[in-house]
Image: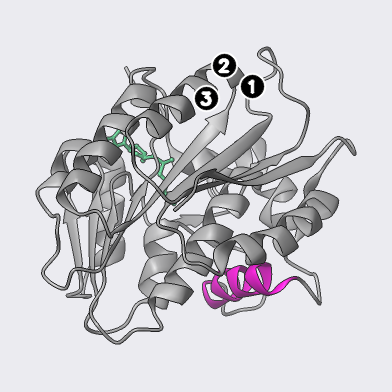
């Protein structure tokens, strides 16, 4: 029985990394007027009430967005991310955390399309309720790994695909590679963003090596850690692999990541990584 619900984790330090990168990529892609397809293979519930029983159980947001909420100044990429979170909290207090669908919806315009996959009934139901009334959004209650492939290439030949599984099933580490390879075969110029937790470093590196072995070029990765790698203490870091990143992204993250380490590291053992995995 799978039990993952993103509501327990919304706004934690891993969401800060994922969503800071997401905002930077969407901002860049939004500069062109041509319609964009945003495909979220693992969309979650859309938006999260931080006062809910889920969020309050471990209050992970307090060591993520909670540490950034009141800052007056931040590097440009973090500042843009904070704008999106503030937009979701019109009253001025941090009560709600926007998931990836909410961030994308806020940044995309009237001609763009959002296709949101969520396989689990409760989350899909919440997502449908959240999405109601916006005709740009389609919610599909099905497997996002399989479902995304048939959408490529999109009619406008512009797409961002976010793959953000829970990795509750260990085969997800192989499935993400297969999905990236299949999607890229159909649409080589799309932008592909993959999030992963660093729980077991060896498993992550096997996945990254497998991505490199696909032969796909132009791949970057960013990681943000709270503690040194360790196989015994849960998630110590998380990362994002991105294929065909905007050329400005590396510079933006080189500025944002050290700043985030300073703000988010609980133990003073925080660290980051920003690298090109495969060049042009
Ligand atoms: C990490 S959460 C997504 C968080 C969301 N992308 C965000 O950033 O706000 C992963 C979600 O994927 C869903 N899920 C798990 N396996 C799936 C699959 N094969 N296809 C679609 N959704 C799946 C889970 O129910 C969960 O809601």
Element carrying mark 1:
loop
Answer whether residue 80 is magenta in the image.
Answer: yes
Q: Give residue 120's position: percent from left, percent from top.
A: 26, 36
Vertical order, 255 against 258 (above or below):
below
Residue plotted at (62% across, 46% down):
275
- Crowding around mark 2 (Cα neighbors within 10 Å: few <14, some 14 to 19, many 20+) is few
Disc 3: which residue: 204
Residue plotted at (46% across, 75% down):
28
Question: On the image, which quarter does residue 111 sit in?
Answer: bottom left
Vertical order, 38 against 5 (above or below):
below
Vertical order, 186 against 254 (above or below):
above
Residue sitting nearer the eye, 1 or 272: 272
- The answer to whether residue 197 shows anywhere in this view is yes
- Crowding around mark 3 (Cα neighbors within 10 Å: few <14, some 14 to 19, many 20+) is some
Do callouts 2 and 3 mark residues in contact (Cβ within 8 Å)? yes
Disc 2: which residue: 202
Element carrying mark 3:
helix
The quadrant of the rendered image in which ligand 1 is seen is top left
Judged from this view, the residue extending furthest toward the right is 268
Residue sitting nearer the eye, 260 or 134: 260
Query: Which segment is the magenta one?
Result: 75-88
231 displayed left or right of 183: right
Disc 1: which residue: 234
């Amino acid at each position: 029985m799978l039990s993952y619900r993103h509501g327990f984790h919304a706004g934690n330090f891993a969401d800060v990394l994922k969503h800071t990168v997401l905002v930077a990529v969407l901002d860049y892609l939004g500069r062109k007027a041509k319609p964009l397809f945003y495909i979220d293979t693992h969309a979650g519930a859309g938006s999260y009430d931080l006062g809910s029983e889920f969020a309050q159980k471990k209050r992970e947001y307090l060591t993520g967005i909670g540490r950034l909420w009141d800052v007056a100044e931040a590097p440009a990429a973090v500042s843009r991310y904070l704008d999106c979170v503030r937009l979701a909290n019109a009253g001025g207090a941090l009560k709600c955390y926007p998931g990836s669908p909410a961030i994308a919806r806020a940044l995309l315009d009237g001609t763009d399309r959002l296709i949101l996959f969520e396989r689990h009934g409760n989350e899909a139901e919440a997502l449908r309720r959240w999405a109601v009334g916006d005709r740009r959004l389609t919610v599909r209650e099905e497997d996002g790994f399989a479902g995304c492939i048939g959408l490529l290439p999109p009619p406008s030949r512009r797409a961002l695909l976010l793959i953000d599984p829970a990795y509750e099933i260990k085969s997800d580490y192989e499935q993400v590679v297969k999905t990236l390879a299949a999607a890229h075969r159909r649409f080589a110029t799309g932008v592909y963003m993959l999030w992963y937790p660093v729980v077991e470093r060896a498993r992550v590196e096997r996945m990254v090596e497998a991505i490199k072995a696909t032969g796909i070029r132009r791949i970057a990765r960013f990681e943000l850690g709270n503690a040194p790698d360790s196989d015994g203490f849960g998630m110590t870091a998380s990362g994002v692999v991105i294929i065909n990143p905007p050329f400005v992204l590396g510079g933006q993250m080189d500025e944002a990541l050290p700043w985030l380490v300073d703000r988010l590291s609980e133990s003073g053992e925080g660290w980051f990584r920003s690298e090109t995995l495969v060049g042009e």
